[in-house]
Amino acid sequence: MGGGNQMLSLALAQRFQRDSAVLVGIAVGAMANAALSAAGGWLISTMIASDARTLFLALALVLGGVGLFIAAKHPDTLDSWRTGPALTAFAGIFILGFGDGAQFIILGLATRTGDPVMAAIGGAIGIFVACAPAVFLRKPILASGGLLWIRRMGGSILMSIGAVMALSATSLL
């Protein structure tokens, strides 16, 4: 929570005041970006060995965890866009997803498992579940300061899991 996708979701929910349309756009944008990430992971999985695939996922998890310790910049609220709430949310989430930690984790999961469909479904659900509270709970989220703690806990968990996977892939564990 508190990442770029959630901050954009929060901004769009405040701008449009049409929660269902914003949520539809978020869902479709997350699905499209997750599908591209998973397809890329599937292509990579056919080129590298099993231990390398595990190491690839470990690296994605560690870097995703590190990213949670870095304060998220407030994304452009897309005020100049003259599209409706669903299309703005779709395009915003889709574009913002490029280079996002979730995209690399989805890529890593598809690479490691060789199952791009499940990686895409799980990734899209994860992105949507992370963004939906920003839409529904925008006022309490704006008033709270607990996002930093949530980000640090999530980052610690991801880095720990990634480190154990890396040690396992290199036969050091």
Image (spheres, rainbow, N blue to C red):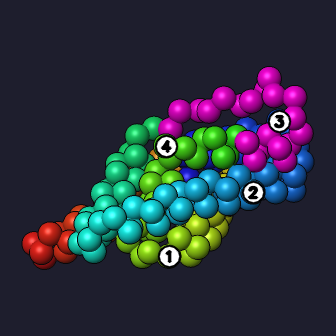
Mark earlier in primary sequence (4, 1): 4
Q: What crowding class fits label 2: few (fewer than 14 Cα within 10 Å), some (14-19), or many (20 or more)?
A: many
Amino acid type of disc 2?
Val
Distance in Å between CA atoms under marks 1 and 2: 20 Å
Numbered circle sitting on residue 28? 2
Q: In which quarter of the image is residue 112?
A: bottom left
Q: Nearer the viewer, mark 1 or mark 2?
A: 1
Q: Which of marks 2 and 3 is in front?
A: 2
Q: What crowding class fits label 4: few (fewer than 14 Cα within 10 Å), some (14-19), or many (20 or more)?
A: few
State the image coordinates of residue 18 (x, y, percent, origin top left).
89, 48
Amino acid type of disc 4?
Gly
Numbered circle sitting on residue 15? 3
Residues shaded magenta: 72-91
In the rendered image, residue 84 lying in the magenta stretch gets the answer yes
Relative to 55, is 74 on the left or the right? Answer: right
Q: Is residue 150 above or below residue 12?
A: below
Number of numbered labels in the structure image: 4
